[in-house]
Amino acid sequence: MSARARLARELAWVLAVVAAIAALAFGAARLFFARPVPAPDIPRSLDAGLKPLMLKQIRAENRLVETPVVTIAVAAIMDRLAPAYAAVPAEDGGVSKVASKAASKEERPTIEVLVIDSPMINAFTVPGGVVCVYTGLMKTLSSVEELAAILAHEMSHAAFRDPLTQLARNVGMATLASVLTGGKGETFAQGLLADLVSLRYGRAAEDRADEFAIALLAKAGIDPASYGSALSRIKGSNPKDLKLLRYLDPHSPIDERIRSAGERAKAAAAKAAAAGLKARRIAVDWRKVLKTLPSVLEPTD
Amino acid sequence: MSSEETARQGAIRLPQPDEIPEREKEDAMAAYLMMFASLAIGLPIPLFNLIASFVYYLVNRKSSRFVAFHALQALLSHIPVVLLNAGLVAWLVVVLVTGLHFTGGFFWYLLFVLALNIAYIVISIIALIHARKGRFYYIPLFGRLSFSRFYGPKAEARQTTAAWENRPPEGT
């Protein structure tokens, strides 16, 4: 046996031993940390603490639409979505493993929906379970089911605590915590809100939120295909420059999302049909809602 | 074994423990202690160990073949461990600075590096004891590389100092 062959053999042995150690460590890690650190390893008190601060800031910076017609429409949607939201198991979606990182049913924040009067095509979620929809986005949608789909998507972000995780990534845990202890004042809340409005969660987070949203819609007895059509509406609303639409993350291509939404909707609808769930329309006159929305000027920026 | 027999088999006559001066035995032992270098100055920078090992090797590579062999073996075997440790420290710093969370992968890596370090320390201590007694000890792979560097077929050509010569056993 040549010297080189002996060297190669020893190299193989060393690598094999190291690989064995790695495998053992992997097994041990799985054993000791069987429940892996939940995705956002951030105390839940932070969500609850940020919520009132952000609510105050949203009210200070925006004009909210609180006309009876809009309020009733949103309430009608939430009547359907809220029980389903509390009931979708953490592992549901059924397709991917990422979905299992959703907060367990008991830990999900209750959802509050605010409608903001603004031409921007946007919707965002505030830590603690506040979902904000802009009238600009509502006007691009063609049915109340589509709005329900958008809300379901935002509710998924709340279930996964994406806003807080992303905020913590952007500004750091220590800074977030310091807001609660009262060190920083309103200017800081202002900055946080500005961050939240345009927060992008990245492809994986959007994907699992899409998945969860479709499972949620099916569970609520709302046609899950409306999610895909809502995305198509948003895409069609401004074909010239998709980047202007803050709601869309350039890292998760809209066409791909629409396509996978279609596939998932089919699967979810089949599953719901098998369980004896029938999609029912939400009893809201969407045209009437659109008419009562305050007429806003064309976007200036 | 006669010298002809040795030559025929292509074997190399190694210095026997009683032929190696105490000083060299201690120097060879010290090569393995370099892994504790950064512990001594109290820094959590694993690369410092590697630098210490490297400097020690540079200083000793021309003094005696026995010491040089152990110094190079200690250095070579140290490289992968130090790189893995540096990876762990870097991961830790990234998590702490950016406020990301620890994932299951981190704990896996932590256990892996921990187990590897323990294995490495045990092997090093065995090698260290052998070196102190004036013996050769081959850590798999690294021992072979180091041996071929200082005792291999091409080692003769690189010899520059008298100290590298194999002296006959004393008293013959």
Image (cartoon, grey):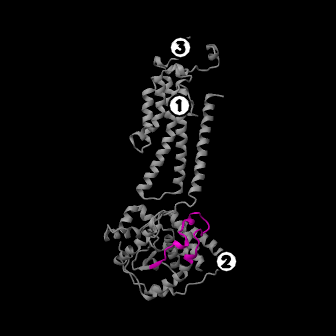
Which quadrant would residue B142 be assigned to in this image?
Answer: top right
Marker disc for residue A275: 2
Quarter location, residue A89: bottom right
Residue A132 sits in quarter: bottom left
Q: Is residue B145 left or right of residue A53?
A: right
- Residue A171 in the image: state x and y as whole percent: 38, 62
Q: Do callouts 1 and 3 mark residues in contact (Cβ within 8 Å)?
A: no
Q: Quadrant of the C terminus of chain A?
A: bottom left
Distance between the alpha carbons at the discs numbered 3 and 2? 92 Å
Q: Determine whether the residue tagged by mark 1 lies in a helix, strand or loop.
A: helix
Q: Which mark is residue B129?
A: 1
Nearest to viewer (mark 1 / mark 2):
1
The residue carrying mark 3 is B170
**Quick check: is A98 in the magenta stretch?**
yes
Q: CA distance from mark 1 to mark 3?
A: 24 Å
- In-front residue for pair B62/A208: B62
Q: Position of residue B60 (x, y in %)?
A: 44, 26
Mark 2: secondary structure:
loop
Residue shown at the point (45%, 38%) measured from the top left: B36
Q: Position of residue A44 (x, y in %)?
A: 46, 69
| Mark 2: few/some/many CA within 10 Å (<14, 14-19, 20+) | few
Residue type beneath disc 1:
Ile
**Is the residue A122 above or below the residue B7 in the image?**
below
Looking at the rendered structure, the kind of residue marked 3 is Glu
User: Same subunit under labels 3 and 2?
Assistant: no
Range of residues picked out in magenta: A84-113
Please name whichever residue, B126 or B65, is drawn nearer the observer in this view of the structure. Answer: B126
> Mark 3 falls on what kind of element?
loop
Q: Is residue A52 visible?
A: yes
